Amino acid sequence: MGKAIRRFGVAVVLGITPAVPSAAEQTPSPPLVLTVHVDNHANISAGVLAGARDEASRVYRAIGVTIRWTEGANAATDASPAVRVLLLSRVMANRKIAAEGLPDSVLGQALREVGWTYIYWDRVKAHASKYARNPIEILAIVVAHEIGHLLLPDNGHSPLGIMQAAFDARTAIAPRFTADQAKIIRGVLGGDEP
């Protein structure tokens, strides 16, 4: 009797297993790609830009989104979806900061209506120096955060993760999107939840 029960249990498990599609039978989701065009008016070095791109890309890869970076003459004008990151020179930044009366804590802004972000490079460097952090890391976080504003509803801020209104640069852990934010971003870009 005991053997019959064991055999039945095995038969049930074996009977269920073939119902799960094999890896070869599963249809992979198409990759979600976001094109980000960078205008480097701040003349940030190629090495710093490359490092910041890598770090910002890592934040988005964690939620299943690949960033395709373009800059200068390589602008992807026909890419969709696409956003623009303007790294402002000191003169450009100071003019915009004065016109809008921005507090010192603002390192970047997003203008959803046109899909642009403004990054205040001098402020990013000062913030990195104040907290003894690598400016590449802070730049990447600010860029990823501001792009998040373009993809998330309302103002997109949250109490946790990369979309916190006030980033604590003293933490050694790079912030990420929350699960809910990831789902929204993937939906905006035409994908399913991660």
Image: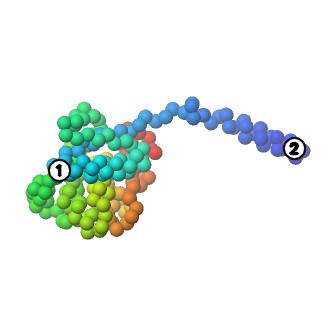
- Extreme-top residue of the structure: 25
Q: Tell me the residue at 37%/63% (across/down).
A: 159
Q: Nearer the viewer, residue 101 or 173?
A: 173
User: Distance between the Cα atoms at labels 2 and 1?
Assistant: 76 Å
Does the image show residue 130? yes
The N terminus - image quarter: top right
Q: Tell me the residue at 49%/34% (across/down).
A: 28
- Extreme-right residue of the structure: 1
Above-or-below relation of 132 to 10: below
Count of labels shown? 2
Above-or-below relation of 191 to 89: above
Q: Tell me the residue at 57%/30% (across/down).
A: 25
Q: Circle 2 is placed at which residue position?
A: 3
Above-or-below relation of 28 to 130: above
- Quarter occupied by residue 8: top right
Q: Position of residue 48 (x, y in %)?
A: 27, 52
Closest to the camera, between mark 2 and mark 1, is 1
The kind of secondary structure element at disc 1 is loop
Amino acid type indicated by mark 1 = Asn
Q: Is residue 122 left or right of residue 21?
A: left
Q: Residues within 10 Å of mark 1 (few under 14, many from 20)?
A: few
The kind of secondary structure element at disc 2 is helix
Numbered label attached to residue 43? 1
Q: Earlier in the sequence, mark 2 or mark 1?
A: 2
Amino acid type indicated by mark 2 = Lys
Q: Position of residue 70 (x, y in %)?
A: 26, 40
Asked if the residue at tag 1 contacts the one at tag 2, i.e. Cβ–Cβ closer than 8 Å, the answer is no
Does the image show residue 146? no
Q: Position of residue 39 (x, y in %)?
A: 19, 45
Q: Residues within 10 Å of mark 2 (few under 14, many from 20)?
A: few
Q: Tell me the residue at 17%/50% (across/down).
A: 43
